[in-house]
Amino acid sequence: EGFDARLLAAAVQAENQSVIHIARDDMRLDAMHTALKFFAPEIPVFTFPAWDCLPFDRISPNADVSAARMAVLATLAAGFDRPFIFLTTINGATQRVPAKSVLKSASFTAEVGRQIDDKELRNFFARMGFVQAPTVTEPGDFAVRGGLIDVYPPGEIGPVRLDLFGDVLDGARRFDAATQRTTEKLDRLELAPVSEVILDEPSIQRFRQNYRIEFGAAGTDDPLYEAVSAGRKHQGIEHWAPFFHEHMDTLFDYLPD
């Protein structure tokens, strides 16, 4: 252990192809990631963590974990043209994920100087699992204050502030959540889903139908069923992801040959 990171980096450099490494657990995954930063800082590394909760638990995965997973899937769905090292665990590799086609179509792009439909952006936040908060502190949070919209996108290093002038994006900047100081100015922002459950109308109807088939009409007084029917996120909703999607892909459907 430790030298295996050097072997992975050598394999990528020798073959000029991407390498997948499946670690036994999260601790070994973190150790491998740290070692790769030392041995091969020039090689892109994608880390795909497993959920940090038990199957069919009553709570959702940690927001940081969900955001990291969706950021990686969105990047792979869009296409990545350089050899990379992909790190995950046995639990992460064996769990099915939303279909690649879903991730390709579930994005929102904002460019400085162009118009933004404020209503469409709010609907995107609601459908893609973002949570409205007084201040953004973790991935998946967003806050609206007049012409300012703060959002913490999945996979981004820090939250982003969108400054609207009417319906035109006048400026975008990444900032430090603690100090509110600008760390980087942006010309373009691409938003991906922060949750593996997308609450749009077809998904809600699909969930309701699958839920009734599985449990009958007697189960429709469940708080989960009521929340989804109203288009609201509910704790533990991610465990029911197959009820929302037409089909689920494996992680390897996202990866190159």
Image (cartoon, rainbow, N blue to C red):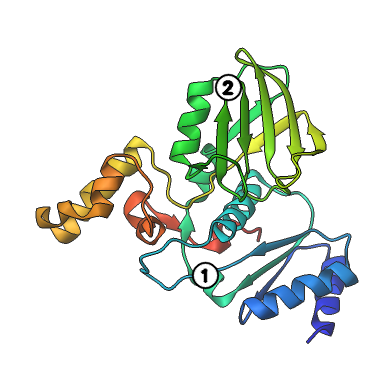
Instruction: Measuring from the top left, give residue 63's x and y in whole percent.
Output: 54, 56
Please say if 204 is above or below 138: above
What label sits on residue 52 in the rendered view?
A: 1
Q: Nearer the viewer, residue 145 or 72?
A: 145
Q: Residue at x 68, y 64 (%)?
A: 47
Q: Residue furthest left?
A: 218
Report the amino acid beneath label 1: Asp
109 on left or right of 242: right
Q: Residue at x 82, y 83 (%)?
A: 2
Instruction: Measuring from the top left, give residue 245's x and y in whole percent.
Output: 37, 50
Instruction: Measuring from the top left, give residue 168's x and y in whole percent.
Output: 65, 15
Q: Residue at x 65, y 27 (%)?
A: 110
User: Where, quadrant-wise, is the C terminus in this rendering?
Assistant: bottom right
Figure quadrant of residue 253: bottom right
Figure quadrant of residue 17: bottom right
What label sits on residue 146 in the rendered view?
A: 2
- Mark 2 vs mark 1: which is more N-terminal? 1
| Residues packed near mark 2 inside 10 Å, few (<14), some (14 to 19) or many (20 plus) | few
| Residues packed near mark 1 inside 10 Å, few (<14), some (14 to 19) or many (20 plus) | few
| SS type, badge 1 | loop
What label sits on residue 36 in the rendered view?
A: none
**Residue 206 showing in the rendered view:** no
